[in-house]
Amino acid sequence: MEKEIKINFEVIPSYQELNDIEKTLFDKAKSIREQAYATYSNFWVGCAILLENGEIITGNNQENAAYPSGLCAERTTIFWASANYPDIKIKKLFVIGAPKDAITSVAIPPCGGCRQAILEYEAKQKDAIEIYFASLDGEIMKSKSIRDLLPFSFDSSFL
Ligand code: THU
């Protein structure tokens, strides 16, 4: 029997349509992207996370000569947020990635490993995290929960 899974997401066609806090997250993800340490791939990614207390945490991808030892922007940022604010919920995660010298780009979604890591914190805080991923010039995709980007997910309920 063939079945179908439906996922929900929103396309926000331009920066102007974001609200103030979303604009701030966009701006911060874009500017921290410029400080990525991505010397091997030259693919620069920035991430901004909004906490429930209003604080914004930023991070970027960190690469390594031993390639698998590097880490994506989303995980760099969310691990730091959880390490420093273990009891404060994460409300939104905004990511912008593009090749180093790109002027325009497409919205790049979090990789599979990052989706799994984000799911862990949704489960931990028992509340959804809104995910945004955007192009440099401001086309934005938005999901209400990482679960929309990770169908058939594995979590602690299986353990
Ligand atoms: N990267 C991220 O930071 N986030 C993603 O979701 C996709 C990939 C980084 C990892 C690596 O430093 C570079 O982009 C190329 O894969």
Image: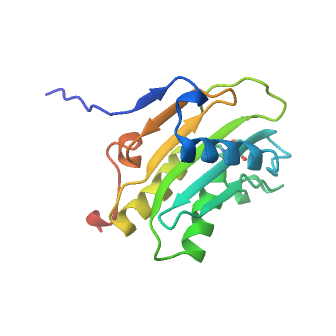
**Horizontal and vertical percent for residue 34?**
81, 45
Q: Quadrant of ligand 1?
A: top right
Whether residue 2 is visible, yes or no, is: yes
* Quadrant including the C terminus: bottom left
Position of 50 relative to 146 (above/below): below
Residue at 63 percent across and 28 percent down: it is: 138
100 lies above or below 95: above
Q: Position of residue 65 (x, y in %)?
A: 84, 55
Question: What quarter of the picture does the N terminus occupy?
Answer: top left
Residue 116 located left or right of residue 104: left
User: In screen coordinates, is 76 left or right of 148?
Assistant: right
Residues 3 and 34: in front is 34
For the residue pair 134 and 17, the one nearer the viewer reads as: 17
Identify the residue shown where x is 63% and y is 25%: 106
Q: Depth check: give the residue in front, 81 or 27.
A: 27
Q: Is residue 110 visible?
A: no
Q: Is residue 119 left or right of residue 14?
A: left
Give the residue displayed 65% in from the left and 39% down from the top. Answer: 96
- Percent position (x, y) of residue 47? 64, 50
Q: Residue 98's x, y, as percent?
A: 72, 33
Name the image quarter holding residue 102. top right
